[in-house]
Image (tube, rainbow, N blue to C red):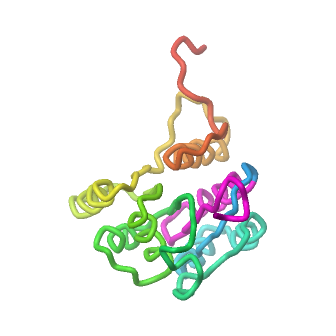
Amino acid sequence: MAGNAKGRIVVGITGASGIQFGVRATGALSALGYEVHTIISDAARKTASAEGFADFEAQARKNSERVYLEDDIGADISSSSYDVRGMVVIPCSIKTLGEIASGIASNLISRSALNTLRMRKRLAIVLRESPLGMIELENALRITRAGGIIVPASPGFYTHPETVDDIIDFVVGKALDALEIDNELYRRWRTGRK
């Protein structure tokens, strides 16, 4: 069992647009008392730079027990014997979605996700792509059938978001819900709300 009573959560940050979702997830999980192990892809670094979020890696490191690069295939978390409570890939690129759906462990993110499924732990995949074609939908279905949960990065406006951070918190909150992690990152739906 992880040294932290709540357990370890692996966060995979890929090169899809929306690196902010991944960094916010590391911060939220850390604040909730989880031991966060974050994997950053090479494409995530490029995307963050293109989107003007150059310090994302420093923020992720501040929120994480350990940070790995995707080519660190021999890291402890690459083994199915490494005890984790679950994993979230946020944001998840179409490439990573396809690798997981096909059982291809070409890097530490896809390998860790496959181990999570193999061990019947919770896996949340936060897709940040639009539109989705038949191939992507079939890959998402394959992951769902294997036990993963697809969480589209689609904001809900019933929460009356006022800032971009509110929208990010909604998506991250939904991802944590998929991992069965209690959180108050967004206001829950209630009928009769003004």
Residue drawn 43% across the image and 64% down it: 119
Placement of the N terminus among the 4 image quadrants? bottom right
Q: Residue furthest top?
A: 192
Magenta region includes residue 22: yes
The count of marks equals 0
Give the residues drawn in magenta, as a range: 1-30
Q: Is residue 192 above or below residue 1?
A: above
Q: Residue furthest front?
A: 1
- Give residue 34's position: percent from left, percent from top: 69, 56
Q: Is residue 70 above or below residue 5?
A: below
Taking the spot 47% from the left edge, 50% from the top edge, the residue there is: 153
Q: Image check: 12 left or right of 31?
A: left
Q: Residue at x 31, y 67 (%)?
A: 101
Estimate the x, y position of residue 87 in percent, counting from the top left: 52, 61
- Residue 112: x and y in percent read 48, 73
Judge from the rendering whether residue 7 lies leftward or rightward of residue 127; answer left or right: right
- Taking 23 as reference, is 143 left or right? left
Foreground pick, 166 / 104: 104
Q: Out of 34 and 134, give the one closest to the viewer.
A: 34
Where, by quadrant of the figure, is residue 99 drawn?
bottom left
